[in-house]
Amino acid sequence: MSFQAFTLIETCITLFIFCLIFTIPTINLKGYQNTVKVHNTRRQVKAIIENYSRYALLKNKAYWLTYNPDSHTISASSGNEFKEYSIDKDVVVKDMKIFKINSSGRFTPRTIVFVCHDKKQQVNLQMMWGRMIDE
């Protein structure tokens, strides 16, 4: 009686192909996760700016938004008011160290860049007709 079986080389080749098939989607998943992190952080920061623009107008107070890259937080302050917001630790926010919103809810136009590994998005903020727009 003789048994037919795979040789060691055939088994190694088959194993290699299966590993390759399961590794490729994992690599693509990481890229997708980074894209989602950047997009969500962009939306979060934009919402913070919009909210404090409204608060400034309603309360007739100027607000300062400060990004701290070490703790990955955005601080909002005005006089004795202070609030801190955490953002994703993998995302770096560029060009937002100090962001001033005056008492009428307006701010100077600027571009804020969000980077997470190889993924990058930007938001161009300006005021038009009393509303914040994102180009």
Image (cartoon, rainbow, N blue to C red):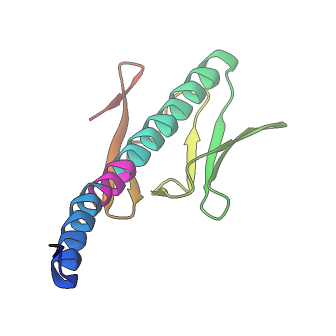
> Is residue 104 visible in the rendered structure shown here?
no
Say if 32 sits above or below 5 in the image: above
> Does the magenta run of residues contain 82?
no
Q: Which quadrant of the rendered structure holds the C terminus?
A: top left
Residue 71 vs residue 2, the one in the foreground: 2
The residue furthest right is 80
The residue furthest bottom is 9
Is 71 left or right of 98, judged from the image as shown? right
Is 134 left or right of 81, judged from the image as shown? left
Say if 135 sits above or below 2 in the image: above
> Does the magenta run of residues contain 30?
yes
Residue 122 vs residue 65, the one in the foreground: 122
Residue drawn where x is 65% and y is 36% of the image: 63
Residue 11 coordinates in the image, percent (x, y): 22, 75
Residue drawn where x is 38% and y is 43% of the image: 36
Residue drawn where x is 51% and y is 53% of the image: 96
Question: What span is in magenta?
Answer: 26-34
Q: In which quarter of the image is residue 52?
A: top right
> Is residue 98 visible in the rendered structure shown here?
yes
Q: Main secondary structure of the magenta part?
A: helix
Residue 40 vs residue 25, the one in the foreground: 25
Residue drawn where x is 16% and y is 76% of the image: 2
Residue 76 coordinates in the image, percent (x, y): 68, 40
Q: Which quadrant of the rendered structure holds the N terminus?
A: bottom left
Residue 85 coordinates in the image, percent (x, y): 66, 41
Say if 63 sits above or below 96 in the image: above
Q: Quadrant of residue 51?
A: top right
